[in-house]
Image (tube, grey):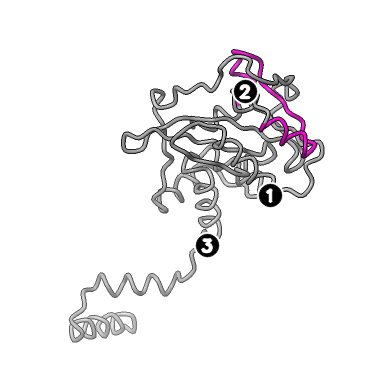
Amino acid sequence: MLKTHKKAKVSILLKIAKLPKSSFYEWKKKLENPIDKDMELKNIIVDIFNKSFERYGYRRLKMTLKSMGYVVNHKKILRLTKELGIQCVKFRTKNRRYSSYKGTVGKIADNVLKRNFSSTKANRVWCTDVTEFKVNGQKLYLSPIIDLYNSEIISYSIQSRPNLNLTNSMLKKALKKVKNTNGLVIHSDQGFHYQHMSWVSTLEENNIIQSMSRKGNCLDNAIIENFLVY
């Protein structure tokens, strides 16, 4: 009887206020559930997604979250990304046909990494590469450095031309973020950027070990190439 009486009061009040029932119950629902339990996780997902240049899908989000101590199943990640309205950008193969290899034009370093795409500490092993893509019909070139410890993007550079400044400016930005570079390994392909004295000398000045993929062997640098095409 009391429940019916309360419902009647609500109906009368809504009628007087000229409000639809749907508005009332939506307001009531928000009061009953004022806190989004997943808000912290959503903020972390958005941060990871933005730092990946909007390239990470649920698999890489799950992997990165796990490295940060968050064990989240793929169904929940899919649900949260849907609620957030985020979706990874997939570049077509025709927009990625770029090779910086121009033969032996400088120093060719040994393949120190040898496909060991892992690290137990941050800022001990970095990988880098250059990729080409199009925005509104214009070619752009992206050069990132990622840390193999947690796939974090240490620094990046985007330009309309794939010149030496593209990679050198990225490297300088990365070095400003790290206090101790002694013994740090940075791996790349044999592109002319990485053979050039400006790149090699910067690494030597900072006691960084240079590592290069073998000629024509994309699997030696698969970790960064997979990152760029995801």
Type of the residue with mark 1? Lys
35 horizontally vs 206: left or right:
left
Q: Secondary structure at mark 1?
A: loop
* Crowding at mark 2 (Cα within 10 Å: few <14, some 14-19, many 20+): many
Q: CA distance from mark 3 to mark 1?
A: 37 Å
115 horizontally vs 52: left or right:
right
Please tell me whether residue 200 is drawn above or below residue 88 in the rendered image.
above
Q: Earlier in the sequence, mark 3 or mark 1?
A: 3
Q: Percent position (x, y) of residue 95?
A: 40, 27
Q: Which residue is mark 2?
A: 189
Q: Secondary structure at mark 3?
A: loop
Q: Nearer the viewer, mark 3 or mark 1?
A: 1
Q: Which residue is mark 3?
A: 37
Q: Nearer the viewer, residue 26 or 133?
A: 133
Q: Earlier in the sequence, mark 3 or mark 2?
A: 3
Type of the residue with mark 2? Asp
Q: CA distance from mark 1 to mark 2?
A: 23 Å
Q: Which residue is mark 1?
A: 176
- Please give the name of the residue rendered at 61% of the width and 19% of the height, measured from the top-left corner: 219
Q: Nearer the viewer, residue 183 or 47?
A: 183
Q: Secondary structure at mark 2?
A: loop
Q: Percent position (x, y) of residue 163?
A: 52, 32
Q: Are marks 3 and 2 in contact (CB under 8 Å)?
A: no
Q: CA distance from mark 3 to mark 2?
A: 44 Å
* Crowding at mark 3 (Cα within 10 Å: few <14, some 14-19, many 20+): few
